[in-house]
């Protein structure tokens, strides 16, 4: 088997596994605990811990919401402090996402175009069908609030930088890579990058955060992803929530299993994305 064939086979296997993970997460029970969200930049500043945050506009130009549930903040700060002692600076790429953010992220042309590029590569240059795009989208983008743990304020996407020279710690690819390099344990990542991934994961694990196996940047705790990773049927304590910034109040989403986008809307976006593909 050639290297290119092996890489495509691995990526296909991982995408199918990620889809299965999402389906299992959808079946996990949840008992929302009601914990409020905490502003991470403020918490890091008050604790004297060096953490940086992405200020790139989110989908629709919305500002990023760098918040986690209160019960996760001590572990977050401890992990960031441990990285500081290591000579690293934790950089938060993304935190809580509103339903609006997650809904439009799943429909964003750039997201679909990235998915289609990987699918065309996966198919050896073939043109994917709308049904195949939707199947892969289920693995790559959370299409329902319950399985998008950013909507639970229980997940962060992170990068790590060196404190001495500001260079990014090599993890084999940058944040939001979408290829055979994306899974946490990808065998196609160079040895040094693999060691860095494992060291970052060990630090996050030590302070209560679980790594999502299919994205090397995503860590979470107390939610349906953790339950799946633990093999637990105990209810997760963090559910998908709406957030009122004015009073920093949260409320569980009434139907977290309801799709964020209608089948018609997703289908229309898929068709537009397919039309953008080179013939």
Image (cartoon, rainbow, N blue to C red):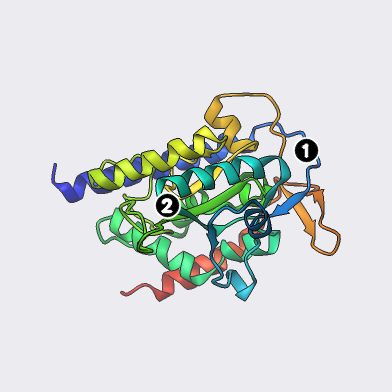
Q: What is the residue that sits farthest to the right in this orientation?
A: 247
Percent x, y of residue 147: 61, 45
Q: Which residue is mark 1?
A: 32
> Looking at the rendering, which quadrant does residue 247 occupy?
bottom right
Which badge, 1 or 2, comes first in the chain's sequence?
A: 1
Q: Which residue does the image show at 57% across and 42% down from the upper left?
A: 78
Which part of the image, by quadrant, shows the C terminus? bottom left
Which secondary structure lies at badge 2? strand
Label tally: 2
Q: In this orientation, does residue 148 appear?
A: no
Percent x, y of residue 265: 62, 65
Q: Is residue 6 left or right of residue 88?
A: left
Q: Which residue does the image show at 77% across and 47% down from the upper left?
A: 255
Q: Is residue 115 left or right of residue 259?
A: left
Above or below for 236 versus 84 = above
Q: Which residue is mark 2?
A: 88
Which secondary structure lies at badge 1? loop
Percent x, y of residue 70: 72, 45
Near-viewer residue (82 or 150): 82
Q: In this orientation, does residue 60 appear?
A: yes
Q: Which residue does the image show at 39% across and 63% down from the upper left?
A: 116
> Looking at the rendering, which quadrant does residue 183 occupy?
top left
Q: CA distance from mark 1 to mark 2?
A: 34 Å
Percent x, y of residue 34: 81, 41
Above or below for 265 versus 139 = below
């Amino acid at each position: 088997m050639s290297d290119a064939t092996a890489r495509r086979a691995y990526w296909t296997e991982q995408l199918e596994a990620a889809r299965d993970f999402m389906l299992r997460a959808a079946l996990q029970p949840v008992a929302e605990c009601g914990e409020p969200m905490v502003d991470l930049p403020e918490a890091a500043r008050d604790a004297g811990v060096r953490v940086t945050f992405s200020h790139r506009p989110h989908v629709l130009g919305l500002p990023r919401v760098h918040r986690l549930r209160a019960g996760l903040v001590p572990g977050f700060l401890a992990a960031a402090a441990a990285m500081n002692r290591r000579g690293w600076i934790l950089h938060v790429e993304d935190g809580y996402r509103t339903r609006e953010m997650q809904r439009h992220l799943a429909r964003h042309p750039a997201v679909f175009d990235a998915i289609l590029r990987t699918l065309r590569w996966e198919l050896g240059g073939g043109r994917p069908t709308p049904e195949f795009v939707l199947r892969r989208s289920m693995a790559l983008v959370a299409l329902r609030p319950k399985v998008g743990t950013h909507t639970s304020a229980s997940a962060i996407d992170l990068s790590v930088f060196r404190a001495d020279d500001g260079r990014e710690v090599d993890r084999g690819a940058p944040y939001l890579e979408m290829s055979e390099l994306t899974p946490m344990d990808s065998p196609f990542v160079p040895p040094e990058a693999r060691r860095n991934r494992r060291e970052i994961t060990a630090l996050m694990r030590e302070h209560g955060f679980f790594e999502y196996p299919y994205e090397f940047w995503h860590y979470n705790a107390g939610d349906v992803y953790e339950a799946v990773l633990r093999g637990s049927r105990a209810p997760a304590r963090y559910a998908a929530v709406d957030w009122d910034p004015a009073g920093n109040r949260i409320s569980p989403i009434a139907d977290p299993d309801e799709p964020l986008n209608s089948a018609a809307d997703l289908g229309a976006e898929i068709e537009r994305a397919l039309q953008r593909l080179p013939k």
